[in-house]
Image: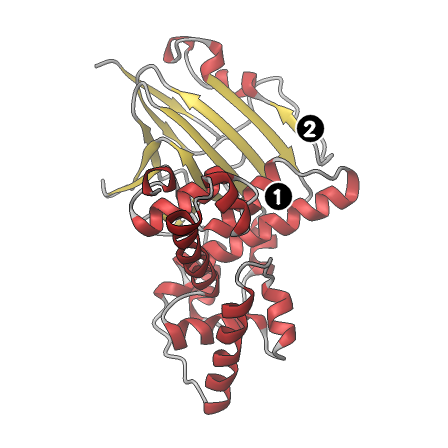
Amino acid sequence: MTEATAVVGTRPAPGFDPPMPTGDFVDLSDVLRGEFDPEFFYSPEDVKMRQLDLPDYTVRDVHVKFRYESFTRGDIGDAGLLNSCIMLEGRSKIILPDAREVASHDGSQNFKFDPNTEFAHWCPPDTTTRAVILTMDVNKFSRFLPEDERWSDEVKMRIEKRQAVLGGQCTPVHAFQLEALHMILNCPITGRLGRLMIESAIMQVLVIQMDSFFRGNATDRLRITKRDADIMRQVKDHLDSTYLEEQSLVGLARSFGINQSKMMKLFRAAFDTTIFDYITQRRMDYAKKLLQKEGLTVSQVSSVVGYKNSQHFSIAFKRRFGVSPSLYK
């Protein structure tokens, strides 16, 4: 099998001046193609990338189909940035310096900081890959992390020492993240307000990702007081009656007079699940009943349980029950 190798991301392509932050997606497919030999692809249409530059973030929507097995090292852009990768289609692997492999596939995600270009990336031949890559400035990320959690201090320390950080084994993309990605890629509002909406959606993707990769693996034991337990029962009761409505962590915390970060930790400790996972569980169980008894179409059920995109609903449903909703009916 022919093998193709490239180094990506140590510097922009020659003659390429990155666009100024405008809040608009720019087609940079030619830049990505320029990182590889043309024989890597069957046609130029096999390589598409559009990029959105914001003051604190960059969003890349990448579609690639390699003709041959490929190995790349680093990322397009500055290797010193933090990267959140959401794999929407396809599969790939991150190969660590000690030869361990971290596999990703459609509907999975990972987070990494690779300042010294230590990680290699593998993609199989004849496989279409679509990923959304969010990059963030290191200083912005440090301000974004909570101040009162051990895992956060450990991540900050590694970043300050320019040591590699990887979220670990890839985890499933949450339904709320898929909805946020839909907003990022298809924001209906332009200008400054549109950029604010996109930045808010990016934060939602990253908050859930940090909770999944780092807080979920933290060793801290949280002591739950009787008052905390009572509040968490109230939160759970509230979600049981409003799970079909749009939910906001900020609004939820404000409603119950509790710090958002503490609320997320307490809920996980009390019920062994996150707030977002609990809402998704309730929505999927209700969707299952609708498909069984009401005779609704998948698109109709998707809308009833709060999904703007029926494909995102199908991904969440299959993850929950192991079968697509179209086959479940």
Residue shown at the point (47%, 18%) measured from the top left: 47
Q: Are marks 1 and 2 in contact (CB under 8 Å)?
A: no
Residue shown at the point (62%, 20%) measured from the top left: 16
For numbered disc 1, what is the local secondary structure? strand
Instruction: Name the foreground residue: 17 vs 112.
Output: 112
Q: Residues within 10 Å of mark 2 (few under 14, many from 20)?
A: few
Quadrant of residue 188 within the rendered picture: top right
The correct choice, above or below, for 267 with respect to 227 in the image is above
Q: Residues within 10 Å of mark 1 (few under 14, many from 20)?
A: some
Residue that carries the numbered disc 1 in the rendered image:
57
Marks 1 and 2, Cα distance to the nearest angstrom?
13 Å
Measured as percent of width and height from the top left, residue 172 is found at 37, 48
Marks 1 and 2, the one that precedes in the sequence: 2
- Residue extending furthest front? 294
Residue shown at the point (67%, 40%) measured from the top left: 54
Instruction: Name the foreground residue: 2 vs 60.
Output: 60
From the image, which quarter does the C terminus lie in? top left
From the image, which quarter does the N terminus lie in? top left
Quadrant of residue 102 within the rendered picture: top left
Task: Say which amino acid is labelled 2.
Answer: Pro
Res. 48 mark: none
Residue that carries the numbered disc 2 in the rendered image:
19
The correct choice, above or below, for 319 with respect to 263 in the image is above
For numbered disc 2, what is the local secondary structure? loop
